[in-house]
Amino acid sequence: MSGFFRFYVGHPPAPICQTDSQWRAPIPLHRTAQAGNAPVDEKAVSYGDYFCAVQDFLSADGMALPLRAVGQCLGGTCQAPDAIGIHLAKHGALYHPARVTLAVGSHRLPLVVNVAISDIGRERIGAEVAHLEHLTTDFPEVYLPRIYGAGSGATPHRQMLPMFAGQWMDGYHELHRTAGENADPERWLVWDNDGDDGAWCLSENQVDAFFRQAVFILTYYFDPRTLHTILEWHHAAGDFIVKGVPGGPIDVRLITVRRYIPLFDIPTEAVMAVHTVLDALAIFFLRTTLWMRLDRLEGVGPLVWAADCAMAPMWEGFVKGLEAMARMHRLPDVFVVGAVRYLAAHEQHDWERLGAQLLARYPSGLPEAGLIARHLKRHITHLVSAIRSTNESSDTPSDRQRVR
């Protein structure tokens, strides 16, 4: 299949082949590492190993996966690709994603292949595939990438690399806090390599929309019957992505579900009480808003904390998420009204008690925990203010500002 598969690295994508020295270089295991600096041992995976494994994965069973992806993208047309481009897009802690482009006639159909090279990636990949399949098939609204298939690919040394293929969110881009030329860490830079203007910063309204939609998505996937919720997302990892143009409307998606587990343990034989669900929602909202304010400058730099003005749109997104979650689980309207009133009745000291409980759960020495601890009291002050001001201005959740 020489020439049918084409391989690329870097930004903008540059071709790579077996005669290039980088083909034999060890692949970095995370985004802050430099190419070629990975430890050289029997477990090291080279760039060539990576590309050969992805090619093997896509070629399996008569290229069943690419054919299935073409069929889904083109409404049932199962035409074989004319060529396939594989671009190593990123070095992540869990996965090394490739942007795979299927050339089918005049169409260029993108999908993502997430490859697990690290030990932790290999441990997590099976659960992530199961979570994504569940959340994209059992929920009517989809804010996550759909899965086309999972398996493994062999390197030339017969080392098997686990991987899965999914929907590439075309037009969506990673974003991070940036100091930029003005040394203003409140700016959010969208890493747009597709547009004519390149990377661009969110406006204040777009930042509000980003927080509103991100909290909405997480709340929508909260399961009130089991207390399952999406955990271990982080802005620094580029887990939320946006689509839009400078100054215009934006749309937000979440691209990973590392863990989808109950927020806290409950006895398996116990009947879920309403007060248990309400307490879980309070913990969920506090935890979500705290982590939503965390990022690293440029994605890899020092930890930074978002401004207090983020609290109001996060509360709005939470309320709209409650409404969507209640519809999904066929809960009565009174559930949303009661949940909003329950959280609004919390005093500053109630939230501080919950905050102390959350901090006690974090591993010792976790950098994010230290930053959260320094900002916790002020965060809760603005959280209480956002809840009360919004709750007092409207008697029913349906009157509040729409998420989009």
Image (spheres, rainbow, N blue to C red):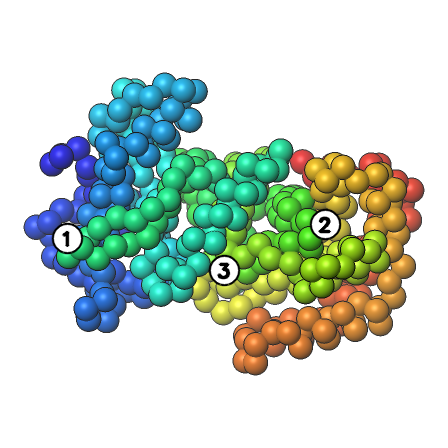
In the picture as drawn, the residue positioned furthest to the front comes out as: 269
Q: Quadrant of residue 231?
A: bottom right
In the rendered structure, the answer to whether residue 403 lies left or right of residue 168 reads right
In the rendered structure, the answer to whether residue 10 lies left or right of residue 302 reads left
Earlier sequence position, callout 1 versus callout 3: 1
Give the residue number, with chain letter if any, for mark 3: 236
- The x, y position of residue 46, in whole percent, is 20, 59
Residue at 42% across / 26% down in the picture? 72
In this rendering, the label closer to the viewer, 1 or 3 = 1
Figure check: 335 above or below 286: above
Give the residue number, with chain letter if any, for mark 2: 225
Residue at 38% across / 40% down in the picture? 149
* Quadrant containing the C terminus in the rendered view: top right
* Quadrant containing the N terminus in the rendered view: top left
Residue at 25% across / 55% down in the picture? 160
Graded by Cα atoms within 10 Å as few (under 14), some (14 to 19) or many (20 or more), the crowding at tag 3 reads many
- The x, y position of residue 40, in whole percent, is 19, 70
Q: Secondary structure at mark 1?
A: loop
Q: Secondary structure at mark 3?
A: helix
- The amino acid type of the residue labelled 1 equals Pro
- The amino acid type of the residue labelled 2 equals Arg
Graded by Cα atoms within 10 Å as few (under 14), some (14 to 19) or many (20 or more), the crowding at tag 2 reads few
Give the residue number, with chain letter if any, for mark 1: 156
